[in-house]
Image (cartoon, grey):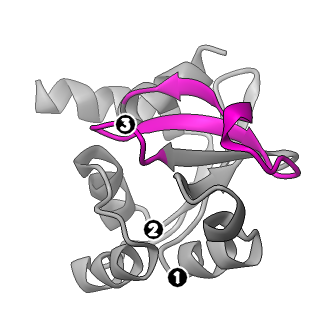
Amino acid sequence: MEEKMNIELLKYIKEMNLNDKTDIQTVETAEKKLGIAFPDDYKDFILEHNGAEGAIGENAYLVIWSMDDIAMLNEEYGVSDFTPELVYFGSDGGEMAYAFDKRTSPFSIVEFPFEALDVSEASLISDSFDGFLNALYIK
């Protein structure tokens, strides 16, 4: 099953520019700063590709922030002030942020307009990171 997921993951990200690996200490530092334990499938991706940017499928664009930038960008966007239920981890390269929704267990992934101030404007995409990539890929 794990090998199948790796093949699926490669299909999703083949057109993206992928960053180099990071280490678990960098991930744990970001988790501590953000007050979150990232989902395992996201963490696996980040450890292998510390961020990415590019087309995913025929109709979507994805920017996944690196562990070096994620805490700073959440602070710059005022996430903890306006939507403390969310932790942003990337965007569509435009007006939409992608975020973990801490109100669910496990965390679901939502899209959220950068300009919005209320978590009620979040739209569910998936209940997993792998599912999130698939949803964008088939969009």
Range shown magenta = 101-127
Visible residue check, residue 98: yes
Residue 90 lies in the magenta-colored region: no
Q: CA distance from mark 3 to mark 2?
A: 25 Å
The residue at the point 56 percent across, 72 percent down is: 70
Q: Which residue is mark 2?
A: 50
135 horizontally vs 94: left or right: left
Q: Which residue is mark 1?
A: 68
Visible residue check, residue 53: no
Query: Residue 45 appears at what percent x and percent y?
Result: 35, 53
Residue 126 lies in the magenta-colored region: yes
Q: Which mark is residue 128?
A: none
Query: Residue 128 appears at what percent x and percent y?
Result: 36, 33
Query: Residue 17 appears at what percent x and percent y?
Result: 61, 56
The quarter holding residue 11 reads top left
Q: Please tell me how crowded label 2 is: few (under 14), some (14-19), or many (20+) other residues with Cα within 10 Å.
A: many
Q: Which mark is residue 104?
A: 3
Residue 122 higher or lower than 114, as above or below? above
Give, as a three-letter code, the residue at label 3: Thr
Residues at marks 3 and 1 touching, judged by CB atoms closer than 8 Å: no
Q: Secondary structure at mark 2?
A: loop
The residue at the point 28 percent across, 78 percent down is: 28
The residue at the point 59 percent across, 78 percent down is: 69
Q: Secondary structure at mark 1?
A: loop
Give, as a three-letter code, the residue at label 2: Asn
Residues at marks 2 and 1 touching, judged by CB atoms closer than 8 Å: yes
In front of the other: 26 or 87: 87
